[in-house]
Image (tube, grey):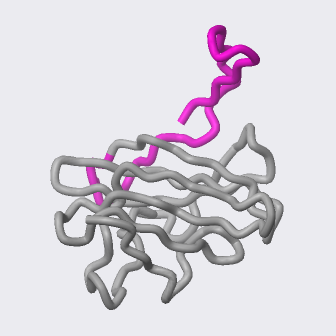
C-alpha cells in the first residue's frame, strides 16, 4: 500500500510504501485493496483496515503504526492475517465477508465504527463498533442498516 498526499486534490506527491504486499505461506492469492486508516483514540496508534480480495472471497486484514506514514504491521497471525469480520457471530456463523467498507470515528465521543456491504445478499449493509484498540469489532454491536 502506497501513500500519496495532496494539498489541493489535484497534484499528488508519493510519500512511500506504508504496508508491504503480503506473501502468504498459505498462498491465499488475495490482493490488497481499499485501505482505510484512522487514528485510534484508545491507543493513539494509526489503524489500517484493508481488504484482501480474490474471486471467491473478500476478507479483512488489520495493520497498525505509530505514524500515519507507516510503516504499518499486520495484527494477529503473521503467516496469514486475512479473516472474515465478526467471525462466529450469531447472524452469520462463518463471519461476514468484507466488501465496500469505510471506517468512521465520531469526533465527539472518539468511538470508531466500520460500515460495509457484506458479500451475501441476505446480510446486507452493516455497521459495527470497533474495540477500544480499533483492531476488531465489538461483540453485540452488529447492526443491519439495510438489505
Vertically, is 131 above or below 120? below
Kindly indicate the quadrant of the structure image that contains residue 98. Answer: bottom left
Would residue 127 appear left or right of 30 to someone viewing this image? right
Report the residue that reaches farthest toward the front: 146
The residue sitting at 40% across, 71% down in the picture is 85
Which SS type dominates the magenta stretch? Answer: loop
Horizontally, residue 137 falls left or right of residue 111, namely left
Residue 57 placement (x, y as % from top left)? 23, 57
Q: Position of residue 39 (x, y in %)?
A: 75, 54
Q: Is residue 83 visible?
A: yes
How many marks the image carries: the answer is 0
Near-viewer residue (75 or 97): 97
The answer to whether residue 25 shows anywhere in this view is: no
Say if 41 sits above or below 17 in the image.
below
Residue 14 painted magenta: yes
Magenta span contains residue 88: no
- Residue visible at 68% across and 59% down in the picture: 105
Q: Position of residue 78 (x, y in %)?
A: 51, 64
When the figure is inspected, residue 107 is found, relative to residue 122, above or below; the finding is above
Q: Quadrant of the C terminus?
A: bottom left
Viewer-proximal residue among 54 and 22: 54
Q: Residue at x 18, y 71 (%)?
A: 122
List the single residue furthest toward the top: 11
Instruction: Give whichever of 85, 144 is nearer the camera.
Output: 144
Q: Which residues are magenta?
A: 1-30
Q: Residue at x 56, y 47 (%)?
A: 36
Q: Position of residue 94 (x, y in %)?
A: 26, 80
Amino acid at each position: 500500500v502506497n501513500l500519496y498526499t495532496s494539498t489541493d486534490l489535484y497534484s499528488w506527491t508519493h510519500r512511500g510504501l506504508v504496508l508491504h504486499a503480503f506473501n502468504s505461506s498459505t498462498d491465499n492469492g488475495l490482493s490488497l485493496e481499499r485501505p482505510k486508516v484512522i487514528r485510534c483514540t484508545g491507543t493513539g496508534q494509526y489503524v489500517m483496515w484493508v481488504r484482501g480480495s480474490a474471486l471467491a472471497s473478500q476478507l479483512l486484514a488489520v495493520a497498525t503504526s505509530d505514524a500515519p506514514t507507516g510503516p504499518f504491521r499486520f495484527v494477529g497471525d503473521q503467516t496469514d492475517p486475512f479473516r472474515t469480520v465478526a467471525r462466529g457471530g450469531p447472524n452469520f456463523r462463518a463471519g461476514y465477508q468484507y466488501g465496500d467498507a469505510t471506517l468512521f470515528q465520531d469526533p465527539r465521543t472518539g468511538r470508531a465504527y466500520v460500515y460495509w456491504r457484506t458479500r451475501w445478499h441476505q446480510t446486507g449493509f452493516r455497521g459495527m463498533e470497533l474495540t477500544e484498540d480499533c483492531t476488531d469489532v465489538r461483540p453485540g454491536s452488529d447492526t443491519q442498516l439495510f438489505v
